[in-house]
Amino acid sequence: MGIVSINPATAETLRTFDPMTQAEVEQRLDRAAGTFKRWRARPVGERAAIVGRAGQLLENEKAAFAKLMTQEMGKLLTAAEQEAGKCARGCRYYAEHGERLLAPEMVPRDGGEPGRDMIMFQPLGPVLAIMPWNFPFWQVIRFAAPGLVAGNVGLLKHASNVPQCALALEDLFRRAGAPDGVFQTLLLGSERVPALIADDRVAAVTLTGSEGAGSAIAAAAGKHIKKTVLELGGSDPFVVMPSANLDKAVESAVKARTINNGQSCIAAKRFIVATSVYDQFAQRFVTAMAALRVGDPFAPETQVGPLATPGILDGLDDQVKRSVTAGARVLTGGHRLDRPGNYYAPTVLADVPLDSPAAQEELFGPVAALFRVPDLDAAIQLANATRFGLGSSAWTRDALEAERFIRDLEAGCVFINGVVASEPNLPFGGVKHSGYGRELGGFGLREFTNIKTVRTFDL
C-alpha cells in the first residue's frame, strides 16, 4: 500500500510514495549505526553549528516550508509560517546553548578525599522518532535539534499523511551540512515499527502521538530495555475565576481551542468557569466561536481550516454525537460542514456529563466543552478529573489562587493568564496518561544521553 499525500482542504491527491523496501531500511539502519560512531566523536560545537545552519535555512525558506505544511495537513498558512519560524528558533537555541548544557558538571566531594567527582552526558546512539502530523516540522525539530547536538543520530518515522514534510526535513539537515546518516527519514507504515524498535542498531525511541500508540511503543521498547520518551494526548483544562480579566480570557479561550484547527495536544479542551462569571463568559465565548471564518487554509481571512484526514473528522463527529446523546447541549456548531474537504463547524458544548466523551476523551478538532464550578476547590478537582496531564491554564488576578493552581494542577505545565505553548528553552511533557520524559530545554537535551558518573582518585 502506498504512502499518500492528500490535501485535506480539497481531497486532492498530491503525491504517492512507495514504502521503503526492507533492503532500503537495512541500508539506512547500517548507515545510522556507522555514522553515529563518527558523529559522537565530533566536538559539540561542530554539531551545534550544523543544527544552527538548519535553523537559518528554516528562517530563510519558511514560506516554502509553510506552503508544504498547509498543503499536506491543512494548517493555516500564517500558522505554518509561524511554525517554521519557531523551528528556526529551536535550532538556534541548541546551537547557542547546547555546548553549555552538555558540559560536564563537577560535584563537590564530601570528606576532603583527593580526586574529583564529575557527571558527563554522552549520546546513546540512533534514536527512532515516531512523529505526528499536526505540527509536522516542530514536532520533529524539537527531537532532532537537541538530539543531534547531544551526539545522537535520528531516524524519523513520520506520520504517513505528511511524507513530503518528512523528506523535506531530511533534505534540510543534509543541506545544513550534516553527514549522511545523521538524520534519515524512513517512509514506511506503522506495522513495521515493532521490528525497528527490536533492532539492535536502534538505541532509543521517542514518540508523540495517541495514548494507544504510546502504550504500544512503550511495551515494545520495554521488551528490549530501550529508553523511551512519550508525549501523548491531553484534555487540558482552561480555568476561569471571578477575578480574571474576562476580555483577555475569552479572546485567549478561542485561540486556545482553535489553534491548529483544534488539532493540538495542548489545545485547551475543557473550559471550567466559576459560577459568578459563567454566563457572561459562555455568552461571549459562544458568540466568538460562532463568528469564526472556516475555509481555505491558504486564504488570509480564514481562521479555522480543515481537519487533517477524513478519519479524524469522522472520529470528532462521533465524539460530539455520543456526548449529545449522553446529555450535552450544543450551543453552537455540532456538525460537519457540507463542502469538499474535512471541515467541522467550531462547536461549544454545555451541560457536559462527566462520563461523556467530551469530558473524558481528547477532542482533536474545534470543539469546546463548558463546565460550571462553584469555587476554587471545585475547579481544581474538576481540572484534575482526567486521566491526562499535559498542559493547563488558569485565569485569575488573585495571587493566592494562582499559587494554588501552580501547586495543585496535575499537569506537566501550568500557565497563569496565558495560553499553553511549548518553547525551546523550557521542558515540555506530561504526567499520568499524557506520557513521561521531557522534550526541550536542558532536560530534553539530556533525555537521550548516558548520564555518566565519573569518580577519580589520585592518578
Image (spheres, helix red, strand yellow):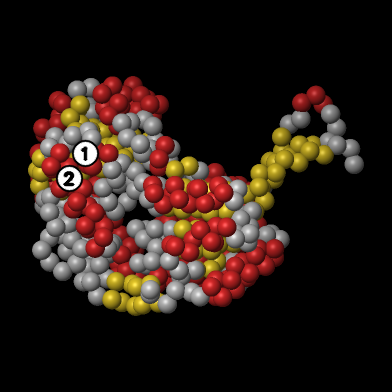
Residue 300 visible at all:
no
- Image location (x, y in percent) of residue 409: 36, 30
- Image location (x, y in percent) of residue 427: 48, 43
Residue drawn where x is 59% and y is 71% of the image: 26
Which corner quadrant of the image does residue 303 belong to?
bottom left
Question: Reading the chain from its start, which is encountered first: label 1 or label 2?
Answer: 2
Which corner quadrant of the image does residue 16 belong to?
bottom left
Labelled disc at residue 322: 2
Residue 204 visible at all:
yes
**Left or right position of 394 against 27:** left
Q: Looking at the image, do the residues carrying marks 1 and 2 touch, with CB atoms under 8 Å apart?
A: yes
Mark 2, secondary structure of its residue = helix
What kind of residue is marked 1? Ser
- Image location (x, y in percent) of residue 100: 62, 48
Residue 308 in the image: above or below residue 382 = below
Residue drawn where x is 23% and y is 28% of the image: 241
Residue 106 in the image: above or below residue 219 = above
What kind of residue is marked 2? Arg
Residue linked to disc 1: 356
Mark 1, secondary structure of its residue = loop
- Image location (x, y in percent) of residue 373: 20, 26
